[in-house]
Image (cartoon, grey):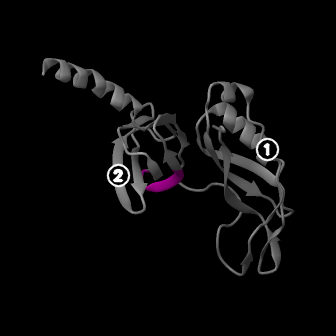
Amino acid sequence: MRRHLAALLFAAPLLLAQSPALSGTVFNAAYAEVKLLQGTEERARTSAGGDGEYAFRGVAAGDYQVVVNGRRLVDVTLRDKAQVLDLHYREASAGPGIRVGGDRMSAKLLTKVPPVYPAAMKAQRIEGPVWLEVDVDQQGAVTAAEVIATPHAELTASAVAAVRQWVYQTTLLNGQPVAVRTAVRVNYTLTP
């Protein structure tokens, strides 16, 4: 009986270490409230520290929405390993352009330059989506890219370099070309 109890006590930390975990830093929002939602159901909640660091441990693998201070930032898929996701929070959209309204014809991506997966990130097996908000001018050129969430700064640099080369079809509002802001996800996935 003691041997079984000792084996169970030894195995428990190993099981916890292999369960999904998500941690990172919320930039620009010290002491932020961070939640994991599935649909409308809250599955986990934590508070970031004064340095913006947060962590979720022991949550079930699956697809979640990450919400910071009541604002949905990104979608994330948790697997059976620890993941890092740095979040860049801001209160309101500060970029040019429009999001909705009028008789708007959506921008269509005409030229998509694929990102280069940094060799160092592959070697370290770092993967995940880089979420950006990009500003597209009246001619369809990407003029700015702001990071919303990222698993690593090197992946962010690669994603921004690629996205800055993308070209969109001109977006029209009531027949007139307009600048827009749109969300972009650049995926970095290691093949098994």
**Quarter of the rendering occupied by the N terminus:** top left
Which secondary structure lies at badge 2? Answer: strand
Q: If the image is split into quadrants, where does the C terminus sit?
A: top right
Vertical relation: 165 (above or below) 124: below
Q: Mark 2 sits on what residue?
A: 43
x and y, in percent, of residue 157 in the image: 72, 36
Q: Identify the image quadrant of residue 16.
A: top left
- Name the residue: 53% across, 46% down: 89
Specify the amino acid type for callout 1. Ala
Magenta-tinted stretch: 68-75
Residue wearing tag 1: 162
Q: Is residue 184 above or below residue 47?
A: below
Report the disc number at residue 135: none
Whether 92 is drawn above or below 192: the answer is below
Identify whether 154 is placed above or below 104: above
Check if mark 2's residue and mark 1's residue have beta carbons within 8 Å. no
Q: Is residue 150 visible?
A: yes
